[in-house]
Image: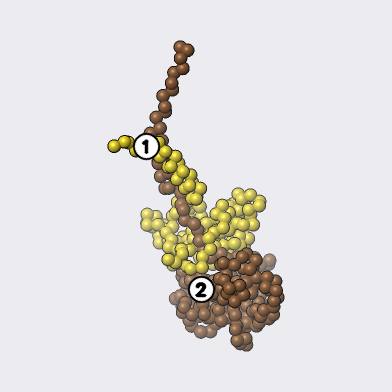
């Protein structure tokens, strides 16, 4: 039996590699909160991921629970934050964008579905104050 | 040494392994989740903190949906379930029978259609929650409201163009959106009882 010619295998794998490099984005943060997003039917895809900042709200992950308790926490970048810190977060994140992209700056709220609205309302009020008016309630598509 | 020596071919048998490792590295460090969600625009902050810029909206033009801390829904003055939200919202937005307790209909010239239609251009849907309401319930109500607009747009698209809204051209979609503009208020929540 003649041996299988594998000389094109690296090219194949490289093609897959490039495909993945294009369609995926780097995972920006390590999640410190656990969230189970709500399920919806009328969802739109996020238009520009590069102009989007994420705010995560949920309970601390199992590993961090002993240290931080089980209350709902806000995570900005890599650490827990309180509501007023959202303003600084928005200002610095938006400041990094090129001027042309600033009007498209969007905040994606990735929140656990059991979060009390109180926290979310507070965050929304801070977002209004910082003129980050475009928001997306992140959700999973109903199967 | 005038003779040219033949260069031995580079052994590339491990390139596949190297690129496999790279591939796996990218698979692990990247995320493919295309973020999806409901897009909303928040209102601008009030110019003056002390000034309460309450929009003057006629009572018949506003549909209040309230959710309390036990996640019970109230539409207008009636208790309701999540399943009722869509039908109530559709009736409210369209007001097909021109009822006096539903938003007022006024003629509006729709550019893309070249005709004038009766629309409830001043209607507002406002979702108010308690601080203890679950975000999931709030989200589901919002989702139902968007679904109500979607169904109304589909209906009118079929009448006008014979196709569903999503299959229309951008200009046609714009015309349909003029008939049923999405007006879901994101205004600040008020304390219960403090209403009016």
Marks 2/1 in contact by CB < 8 Å: the verdict is: no
Residue A40 is left or right of residue B154, and the answer is left
- Chain identity of mark 2: B
Q: Colour of chain B?
A: brown
Kindly identify which numbered label has been placed on residue A5: 1
Q: Mark 2 or mark 1, which is nearer to you? A: 1
Q: Colour of chain A?
A: yellow
Q: Which residue appears at 42% of the width and 66% of the height?
A: A143
Percent across and percent down for residue B162 are: 58, 73
Q: Which residue appears at 43% of the width and 42% of the height?
A: A12
Crowding at dot 1, Cα within 10 Å, few <14 / some 14-19 / many 20+, comes out as few
Residue B65 is left or right of residue B26, and the answer is right
Locate the C terminus of chain B and report the quarter of the image it occupies.
bottom right
> Mark 2 and mark 1: span between their CA atoms?
57 Å
Residue found at the very far left of the displayed protein: A1
B120 in relation to B27, above or below: below
B3 in relation to B177, above or below: above
Kindly identify which numbered label has been placed on residue B68: none
Percent across and percent down for residue A7 are: 40, 36
Which residue is tagged 2?
B144
Percent across and percent down for residue A117 are: 50, 69
Crowding at dot 2, Cα within 10 Å, few <14 / some 14-19 / many 20+, comes out as many
Percent across and percent down for residue B42 are: 60, 66
Q: Is residue B100 visible?
A: yes
Residue found at the very far front of the displayed protein: A1
Q: Which residue appears at 70% of the width and 74% of the height?
A: B114
Callout count: 2
Q: Is residue B126 visible?
A: no
Q: Secondary structure at mark 2?
A: helix
């Amino acid at each position: 039996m003649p041996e299988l010619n594998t000389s094109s295998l690296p090219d194949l794998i490289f093609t897959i590699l490039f495909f993945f490099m294009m369609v995926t984005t780097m995972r920006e943060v390590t999640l410190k909160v656990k969230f189970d997003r709500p399920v919806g039917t009328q969802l739109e895809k996020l238009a520009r991921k590069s102009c989007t900042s994420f705010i995560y709200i949920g309970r601390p992950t199992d590993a961090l629970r002993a240290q931080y308790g089980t209350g709902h926490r806000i995570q900005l970048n890599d650490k827990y934050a309180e509501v007023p810190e959202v303003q600084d977060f928005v200002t610095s994140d938006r400041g990094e964008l090129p001027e042309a992209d600033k009007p498209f700056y969007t905040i994606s709220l990735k929140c656990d579905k059991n979060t009390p609205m109180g926290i979310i309302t507070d965050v929304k009020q801070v977002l209004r104050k910082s003129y980050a008016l475009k928001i997306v309630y992140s959700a999973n598509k109903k199967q | 040494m005038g003779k040219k020596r033949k260069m031995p071919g580079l052994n590339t048998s491990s390139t596949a392994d190297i690129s496999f490792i790279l591939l796996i590295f990218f698979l692990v460090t990247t995320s493919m989740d295309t973020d999806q969600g409901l897009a909303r625009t928040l209102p601008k902050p009030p110019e003056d903190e002390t000034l309460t810029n309450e929009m003057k909206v006629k009572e018949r033009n506003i549909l209040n949906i309230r959710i309390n801390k036990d996640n019970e829904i109230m539409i207008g003055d009636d208790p309701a379930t999540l399943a009722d939200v869509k039908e109530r919202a559709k009736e409210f937005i369209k007001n097909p029978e021109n009822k006096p307790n539903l938003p007022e209909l006024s003629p509006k010239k729709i550019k893309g259609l070249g005709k004038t239609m009766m629309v409830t251009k001043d209607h507002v849907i406002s979702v108010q929650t308690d601080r203890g309401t679950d975000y999931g319930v709030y989200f589901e109500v919002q989702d139902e409201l968007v679904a109500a607009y979607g169904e109304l747009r589909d209906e009118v698209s079929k009448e006008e163009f014979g196709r569903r809204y999503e299959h229309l051209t951008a200009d046609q979609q714009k015309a349909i959106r003029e008939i049923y503009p999405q007006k879901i208020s994101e205004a600040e929540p008020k304390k219960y009882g403090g209403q009016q």
